[in-house]
Image: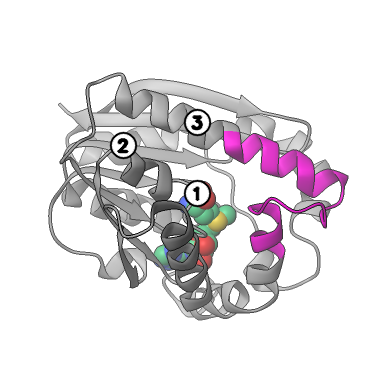
Amino acid sequence: AEEVGGGDKEVVREYFNSTGFERWRKIYGETDEVNRVQKDIRIGHAKTVEKTMLMLTEEGSLAGVTVCDAGCGTGLLSIPLAKEGAIVSASDISAAMVAEAEMKAKQQLGSENLPRFEVNDLESLSGKYNTVVCLDVLIHYPQSKADGMIAHLASLAEKRVILSFAPKTFYYDILKRIGELFPGPSKATRAYLHSEADVENALRKVGWRISKRGLITTQFYFSRLIEAAPM
Ligand code: SAM
């Protein structure tokens, strides 16, 4: 098995506990130890987080709202969600990422409304949340696995799902730049792009429809952001 959910999941886990953790901790951090490309990705990703927070808060206050942040990384979304009063369940396949997120959350939130952190892959998540968010994780899933992953995320959500992914519309642009984003021959660093129609179909199959769309692009970062709701 060469895909996430098969053998690749172990490879992805290993990557995000080692070299991938170091790379992304820097990109998602605040220090200057990033190159021009990494800096650009940091800015693009920050826009995705900002847009996600807008999509969520324009529907009303997040105080007391349960949110699952699936694949939370270093906590860049979980922390602002908690600041808005959301009851956050944050998880990631990488123990290193979860530890980093937890440390940052304690630094920035004190003991105030801390997210519940857990090392867990998406497929093992259970329970019900008002809102499920999964930012920039689909890139590790080929479309064949993405359908099941999207269906599973929808099954955990009562009201809305917010997803972001690298859109296939920018295939050639991304290919040209991908070498810098995911260097090396490693399977873990293989990036999968998704067409919006495929994601929309996966949602429709389980009775969900896209209710909001956003697109975030910088020089090296491309992300389609969608919010979906039950039909
Ligand atoms: N969502 C975070 C954000 O936007 O700041 C992190 C995005 S980062 C590019 C991708 C994250 O997905 C990594 O932290 C990685 O460990 C996690 N990940 C990859 N495959 C996963 C899986 N099957 N289950 C849970 N997390 C996964």
Q: Nearer the viewer, mark 2 or mark 3?
A: 2
Judged left or right of residue 20, residue 61 is: left
In this rendering, the count of numbered labels is 3
Label 1 lies in ligand 1 vicinity (Cβ under 8 Å)? yes
Above or below, 39 relative to 16 = above
Residue beneath label 2, please? 84
Task: Point out which mark residue 50 bears.
Answer: 3
What separation in Å lies between label 2 and label 3 (alpha carbons)? 13 Å
In this view, the residue in front, 150 or 18, is: 18
Q: Which residues are magenta?
A: 23-46
Q: Is residue 86 above or below residue 141?
A: above
The label shown at residue 76 is: 1
Q: Position of residue 158 (x, y in %)?
A: 13, 41
Q: What amino acid type should be assigned to the residue bearing mark 2?
A: Glu
Residue 6 image point, x, y percent: 44, 76
Identify residue type, mark 1: Leu
Q: Which residue does the image show at 12% across and 53% down from the upper left? A: 128
Q: Residue at x 44, y 45 (%)?
A: 77
Can residue 28 be found in the magenta stretch? yes
- The percent position of residue 21, horizontal first and vertical second, equals 63, 70
**Residue 119, picture quadrant:** bottom left
